[in-house]
Image (cartoon, rainbow, N blue to C red):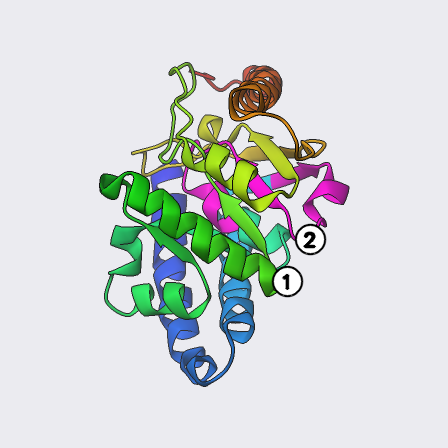
Amino acid sequence: MGILRALIFNVFLHLWTVTMAILSLPTWLFSPVIVFRSAQVWAWGVMKLAEIFLGVGAEVRGREYLRERRVVFASKHQSSWETVKLSTLINQPSIVIKQELAQMPVYGYYFRRAGMIPIDRNKGISAIRGLIKMSKRRLGEGRSIMIYPEGTRTAIGEKPHYFPGIAALYSELDVPVVPIALNSALYWRRGSFTKIPGRIIIEALPPIPPGLDRKAFLAELEDRIETATARLVEEGRADLRGRGYDPG
């Protein structure tokens, strides 16, 4: 049954993606704000499809912090699910993405036109300089920055590694950083075709104000995100056990 539900979801996902890609073509003539609005419509549709066909919904905590403007949002990264969901919750974020995504045919152009910030981590310090420069530009446009400090998905129980890009942004942009915790990997498992029905919890935490030194900031950010994530993971595991699923 889970395989059939996942198959139906993927069929409708591809149909929805192609439809929105075609309907969004005229937005290329307008501002990045309009382009991103069309991407938010696509993301909203994907989340609806996930609810209908997979039974995967969301509980959002700390919504008041997600309404902040001209801040840096720093999120835990466990699955592809949050990369879609968060774009529906935050108003016009400029998302830091891997350079490879910006180079994809068609989709890469959408990313660039929507004002995303591509970064090539292989370029070291020059990549960080570019990240800071583009982030300052986006903040000047009234947008916020969205970044996954770990750079890639981290499995539950795996030791996290926070890259220096987030500390550089904190130091150079002089704006608050809003940490975000979640437990998506329990339901939307990496590499698994099927998904586990349930409510993924996303929790935005109180902003970290500017002014800390880099080392203190990184320690504070990691502690807040990892502590809250561990709590949400245990909450999710209890939910899964109560419904007869193996929480892993």
Q: Secondary structure at mark 2?
A: loop
Residue type, numbered disc 1: Gly
Residue 69 badge: 2
Graded by Cα atoms within 10 Å as few (under 14), some (14 to 19) or many (20 or more), the crowding at tag 2 reads: some
Residue 49 badge: none
Name of the residue lying farthest toward the right: 64
Residue under the image location 28 percent in, 70 percent down? 106
Residue under the image location 34 percent in, 32 percent down? 190
Q: Are marks 1 and 2 in contact (CB under 8 Å)?
A: yes
Residue type, numbered disc 2: Arg
Segment tinted magenta in the rendering:
58-85
For residue 21, which quarter of the picture? bottom left
From this viewpoint, is residue 227 visible?
A: yes
- In front: 131, or 245? 131
For residue 237, which quarter of the picture? top right
For disc 1, the marked residue is 142
| Mark 1 to mark 2 CA distance (whole Å) | 7 Å
Graded by Cα atoms within 10 Å as few (under 14), some (14 to 19) or many (20 or more), the crowding at tag 1 reads: few
81 over 87 or under it: above or below = above
* Residue 84 belongs to magenta span: yes
Q: Position of residue 27 (x, y in %)?
A: 47, 80
Q: Position of residue 241 (x, y in %)?
A: 55, 15
Residue 32 falls left or right of residue 5: right
221 over 177 or under it: above or below = above
Name the N-terminal-most of marks 1 and 2.
Answer: 2
